[in-house]
Image (cartoon, helix red, strand yellow):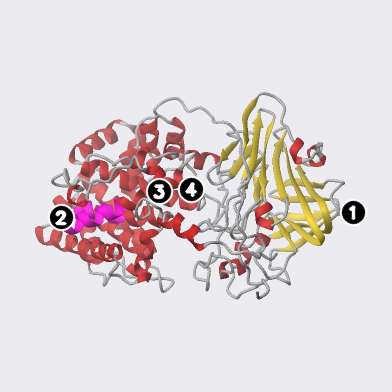
């Protein structure tokens, strides 16, 4: 596929930097950040003041003593903290030679665990172990500001340790830890904000992706911890961080989803929770961060984007989909917005984290099952299922969106499918982050040379396969129709921008049993098309190529081609096509095959596949034009949206002017 136009760079600059200040979205103007000189006015004296206060500790002790669930959650945290008593402190380790992030994240967990047990029980063994950890972290040569996520998470970790263990530390120990926060956390942060750091360290100051939540959140927590010791530095850092956070919070609009996928929703929301909670306890207000559009609904993400098998719809740079997200802040959201479903998600997936213990409260009301089908219009993801509370239920999810979003891939139109407790249609997830050019996600960037980032590595279409980008990086594929009733649901995605020709994909769950994927394209002369579905199932194609049987875990799924589809089924390896780029170092897709349909054609062309249980009726939906699709009964959803016109991007394959 060849893209022949130029995409204005100014559009990217505007979306990244905003027009209402650094990283601030105009739509979030209701968030009021005080001037730098006033931002720490009202900073609570004494410690702890981050997430917990002395009054909060007293209340927590009572809840652990009087609530069996709180006690059980606490026991899990204490067991982990007790195991730490016999372990050595963390060391300065970069497993990939670049990131300290694993160490920083381990430090966050350790400081919360040890600090919580100390606050609840006052046992000096946990405080002493916490100090040995803090002493080691403070002695690190730096907190790796070249990859500032590491610095931010370490600042957060040490700030929590300093705050929660404060009463157990000597004046000298307190000074050591506080100076480390100032020198290795807040000072590199200030240098990034004021432009005195090198670009490689400070580029994050203008982004609105998950880095915004994590870095600005971690630095805010550090500033709140030592704001009384270095008020000038802490005020500057807190002000700079908090003026940027609204730009990230705008991503939750309109319906709570996150544009970087489910795992980065988890990461961003986790840090949003830390920050809001620390602001509330240290300053008495979250400045309106928790009231942004969509944030009240963000708990819908782990509800609807997780299938009956417990696996996430792992689109974008998500990893293995096997685990549902664990976000303790859902307890707070449940209490704040009266959403019992958020409470249920939090309790079902508690690890437990120390903040599961802190934020747990009884459910705010009865838990009522939501609709079985959901459209996240903000990220163009639709999910449909046959039932709740049935691990064998049928589940299908599909997406549009844009490859140009951070962490996204050329997966427009892709889908995942579950039946009988098996995920049959899978998403391969992310590639190795350290591959050369993996972050070059602009037009002609090397990211689009890696199989897992390309359309050919997803359950979607490739038109005229060659070495070029196989979807337009600038495309914005809108789910233009979403309809549901008790009888079923369907979503229609406009893929015209992805392929630069008229193209729509309909994905439907009909009679709450069979799944139909129907593509309608208007092809140029002699166009070649490949339809693909990645799977770990064993595949047997019928002799006539018109049907296939997929078997996995003893469960059978049948795939049927509509009579109007010109091609036939075949089985292929999950590897780059002979005409595709094939850089070294890519992750092998071991155990994965592709069910494919290949055809050539011109003009109006359809490819329609129906998935059923063995011997079940195929139905008529595959033969019905997408525009005529309906689901009988009283509508539970009926959304029509205009397609998004997107500019074309240049391609490495474009002819020279």
- Tell me how far mark 3 sits from mark 4, CA to CA: 15 Å
The residue identified by callout 3 is: 25
- Tell me how far mark 4 sits from mark 2, CA to CA: 34 Å
| Quadrant (top left/top right/bottom left/bottom right) for the C terminus | bottom right
- Tell me how far mark 3 sits from mark 2, CA to CA: 28 Å
- Tell me how far mark 1 sits from mark 4, CA to CA: 43 Å
Secondary structure of the residue carrying numbered label 3 = loop
Relative to the observer, which residue lies in front, 606 or 310?
A: 606
Secondary structure of the residue carrying numbered label 1 = loop
650 relative to 603 in the view: left or right: left
Relative to the observer, which residue lies in front, 600 or 602?
A: 602
Q: Is residue 287 visible?
A: yes
Magenta-drawn stretch contains 519: no
First in sequence: mark 3 or mark 4?
3
Place of residue 4 in the rendered image (x, y in percent of width and height, measured from the top left): 66, 65
Magenta residues, as a range?
217-242
Disc 4 packing (10 Å; few <14; some 14–19; many ≥20) = many
Q: Main secondary structure of the magenta part?
A: helix
Which dot marks residue 252?
Answer: none
First in sequence: mark 1 or mark 2?
2
Residue placed furthest toward the front: 657
First in sequence: mark 4 or mark 2?
2
| Quadrant (top left/top right/bottom left/bottom right) for the N terminus | bottom right
First in sequence: mark 3 or mark 2?
3
Compared with 443, 353 (above or below) is above
First in sequence: mark 1 or mark 3?
3
The residue identified by callout 1 is: 544
Compared with 71, 205 (above or below) is below
The residue identified by callout 4 is: 258
């Amino acid at each position: 596929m060849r893209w022949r136009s130029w995409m204005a760079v100014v559009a990217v600059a505007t979306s990244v930097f905003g027009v209402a200040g650094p990283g601030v979205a105009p739509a979030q103007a209701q968030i009021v950040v005080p001037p730098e000189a006033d931002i720490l006015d009202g900073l609570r004296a004494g410690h702890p003041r981050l997430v917990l206060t002395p009054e909060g500790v007293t209340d927590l002790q009572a809840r652990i003593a009087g609530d069996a669930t709180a006690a059980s959650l606490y026991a899990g945290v204490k067991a982990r903290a007790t195991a730490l008593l016999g372990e050595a402190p963390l060391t300065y380790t970069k497993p990939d030679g670049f990131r300290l992030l694993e160490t920083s994240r381990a430090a966050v967990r350790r400081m919360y665990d040890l600090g919580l047990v100390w606050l609840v029980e006052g046992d000096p063994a946990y405080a002493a172990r916490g100090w040995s950890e803090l002493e080691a972290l403070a002695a690190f040569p730096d907190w790796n500001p070249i990859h500032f996520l590491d610095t931010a998470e370490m600042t957060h970790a040490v700030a929590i340790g300093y705050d929660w263990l404060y009463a157990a530390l000597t004046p000298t120990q307190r000074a050591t830890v506080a100076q480390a926060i100032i020198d290795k956390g807040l000072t590199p942060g200030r240098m990034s904000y004021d432009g005195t750091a090198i670009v490689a360290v400070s580029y994050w100051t203008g982004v609105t992706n998950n880095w915004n939540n994590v870095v600005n959140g971690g630095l805010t927590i550090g500033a709140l911890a030592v704001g009384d010791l270095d008020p000038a530095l802490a005020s500057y850092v807190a002000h700079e961080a908090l003026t940027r956070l609204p730009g990230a919070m705008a991503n939750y609009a309109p319906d709570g989803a996150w544009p970087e996928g489910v795992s980065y929703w988890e990461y961003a929301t986790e840090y949003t929770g830390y920050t809001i909670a620390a602001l509330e306890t240290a300053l008495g207000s979250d400045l309106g961060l928790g009231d942004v559009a969509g944030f009240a609904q963000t708990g819908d993400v782990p509800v609807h984007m997780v299938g009956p098998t417990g696996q996430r719809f792992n689109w974008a740079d998500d990893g293995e989909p096997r685990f549902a997200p664990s976000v303790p802040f859902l307890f707070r959201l449940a209490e704040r917005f009266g959403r019992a479903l958020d409470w249920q998600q939090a309790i079902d997936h508690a690890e437990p984290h120390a903040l599961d213990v802190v934020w747990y409260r009884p459910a705010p009301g009865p838990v009522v099952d939501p609709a079985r089908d959901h459209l996240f219009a903000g990220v163009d993801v639709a999910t449909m299922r046959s039932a709740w509370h049935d691990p064998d239920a049928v589940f299908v999810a599909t997406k549009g969106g844009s490859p140009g979003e951070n962490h996204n891939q050329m997966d427009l139109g892709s889908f995942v499918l579950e039946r009988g407790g098996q995920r049959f249609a899978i998403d391969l997830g992310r590639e190795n982050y350290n591959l050369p050019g993996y972050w070059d996600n602009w037009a002609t960037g090397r990211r689009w040379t890696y199989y897992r980032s390309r359309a050919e590595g997803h359950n979607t279409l490739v038109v005229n396969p060659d070495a070029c980008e196989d979807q337009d990086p600038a495309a914005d594929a809108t789910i233009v129709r979403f309809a549901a009733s008790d009888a079923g649901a369907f979503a229609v995605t406009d893929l015209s921008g992805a392929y630069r020709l008229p193209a729509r994909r309909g994905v439907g769950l009909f009679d709450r049993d069979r799944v139909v994927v129907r593509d309608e394209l208007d092809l140029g002369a002699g166009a070649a098309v490949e339809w693909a579905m990645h799977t770990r199932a064993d595949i047997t194609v019928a002799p006539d190529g018109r049907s296939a049987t997929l078997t996995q875990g003893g469960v059978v799924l049948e795939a049927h081609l509509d009579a109007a589809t010109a091609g036939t089924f075949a089985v292929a390896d999950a590897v780059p096509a002979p005409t595709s780029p094939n850089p070294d170092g890519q992750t092998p897709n071991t155990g994965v095959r592709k069910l494919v349909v290949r055809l050539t054609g011109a003009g109006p062309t359809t490819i329609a596949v129906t998935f059923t249980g063995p011997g079940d009726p195929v139905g008529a939906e595959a033969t019905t034009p997408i525009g005529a699709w309906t689901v009988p009964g009283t509508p539970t959803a009926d959304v029509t949206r205009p397609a998004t016109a997107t500019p074309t991007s240049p391609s490495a394959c474009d002819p020279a002017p």
